[in-house]
Image (tube, grey):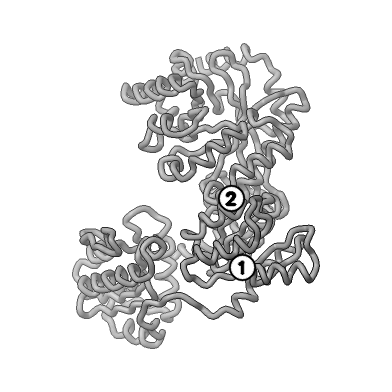
Amino acid sequence: MTRVLLIEGDPARRDRFALALRKARFELRSAADAEGGLRLLPEAHPDVLVVGAMSTGMDLREACAAARSAGSGRALSVIALLPESAQTARAVREAILDGADDALPFDCDPADLVEAIRARERRTPAAGPTLSEDVPSFAAMESAAQAMPRPLWIVSLEIEDADAVASVEGFEALRELSELWRGRIRALIPEQAAFFPAGRSTATVFLPGSTPEPRALLAALGGTGQPVVRVGGRELRLRSSIGVLQVGDGERLPPIEIALARSRHALAVARLGPQPRLHVHSAGDAERTLREVHLATLLQHALERGDFRLVYQPIVSIASGETIAAEALIRWNLPTTGESIPATRLLAIAEDAGLLAEIGSWALREACRQCAAWSRAGVDLPVSVNVAPSQFRRGDLEDEVRLALSEAAIPGRLLTLELQEGLLERDGEAMLPQLEGIRVAGARIAIDDFGTGIAGVGLLHRYPVDELKVDRTVVARLPGSAEDRATLESALRHARGRGIACTAEGVEQPAQWAFLAERGWHAAQGWLVAHPLGGNDIPGFVQRDPAVRAAAASAQGA
């Protein structure tokens, strides 16, 4: 898959180009300026660098030279997107002289950029180191499989973290790791097994029915009990993701191409799961995957046509019942059946399809637009928007926030970005500059789903946080055990000490409301307060008597 790094300072143009590049199945990273792009180069390893408006003092010649220098000898093609003021043949020639391999006009269609990259693929021979023994022929593999006693296990294996090792330690380290990995496989499998290494980090093994304790062997191949090895100055544990197709006694072996496809599909499923990453193919796997692919295609069309919508769940003060904010939640109905797709499933499919960042960008702009409409209706109500990890990984979220606020003409104080606790645990240090920039833009930061991770209140002291939102799974247990109450009271104490507001999500029972009110919690949201509402219904909800609302919430179910 061709890797593309896109540098474009205009968020709208960047989103338009990014959507087309992802739709064309390129592996894409993007940055808002040349400096951000250069920081991404060591980890992105792009084959093609697309340079548009760079929003810095660095010119095209400097950007090309710096990119090729940072590429550590990797073949890199540069495509320049010319500025609006430079649309002549002379401008194209100057871009080529400055180091670009190709140049496109400012108003080019994203399809033109896709075709330019495809053209470079056709002209550029495959480059880079290869490790390997040749990929075995289907005929050799089918012959080996047919000769084995049943049951037969067709096992596809892949070294975990191979790309990380190559990007940090280099391909020689990956070659060394691959040799150790292959040696380990050969040492573990029985003599009657067949081993087919292929490429730098993948292999196929056929295990015959005579294999003793095959499931224990599969666990060992995955990493259970494997020793730590030293590669490139680092200690690593040899771990594999594993996909298995089992051919039972008396069962006819499918054509080897199909058998291998099923085994490798099981490997793809295993990659997405927790450790140990092992999945055994079942009859419904392929059908489920095709359904997900179909849904991903429909999501792509929905994004292009603007078929998503946002609803808003009111957040109210526990003390007064006053509506103090609303959280934007995405909704989408299948165009074929009208079925409403649950938000968690929608977002999971979007993430797997590489669409989550674009959908998140749309939601951010749409929520700000709705917030501006409320202000024009006399309701100055802040809106909260969930942010996906992929939006942070692109490196330009601060620019997106500033653009959304500017387009909607609302102040930053009316926007809160909600980040999952787990995201801050994993990537908080890398995200810190963006978080600080978002705060400078005036927007607020909330930790969402608090209580589902392990970092706890420590996050409040390490990162710029304005609000703490306790996850609905924690709230559902209230009043809960003494341990639950102690955890929440500790969170409340630390948050108050730092001036951080505390909101409880998923409040559905009067007993939960009473518990929170007694302990001085700031706000609540959930079905006890209100179901999510359409954007046009929020002003009417806000204008209801808050004292009546608070009394009703306390009294329900009494």
The answer to whether residue 219 shows anywhere in this view is yes
Which residue is found at the position 51% from the left and 28% from the top?
467
The residue tagged 2 is 357
Task: Residue 46 in the image: state x and y as whole percent.
Answer: 53, 65
Spot occupied by residue 505 in the image (x, y as percentages of width and height): 50, 29
Q: Which residue is mark 1?
A: 78
Residue at x-position 57% and y-position 12%: 551
Nearer the observer: mark 2 or 1; the answer is 1
- SS type, badge 1: strand
Q: Nearer the viewer, residue 273 or 259?
A: 273
Residue at image location 39% in from the left, 76% down from the top: 199
Q: Amino acid at mark 2?
A: Ala
Q: Measured from the top left, where is residue 479 in percent x and y?
A: 40, 21
Within 10 Å of disc 2 (Cα), the crowding (few <14, some 14-19, many 20+) is many
The image shows residue 12, relative to residue 312, as above or below, that is: below
SS state under label 2? helix
336 relative position to 293: left or right = right
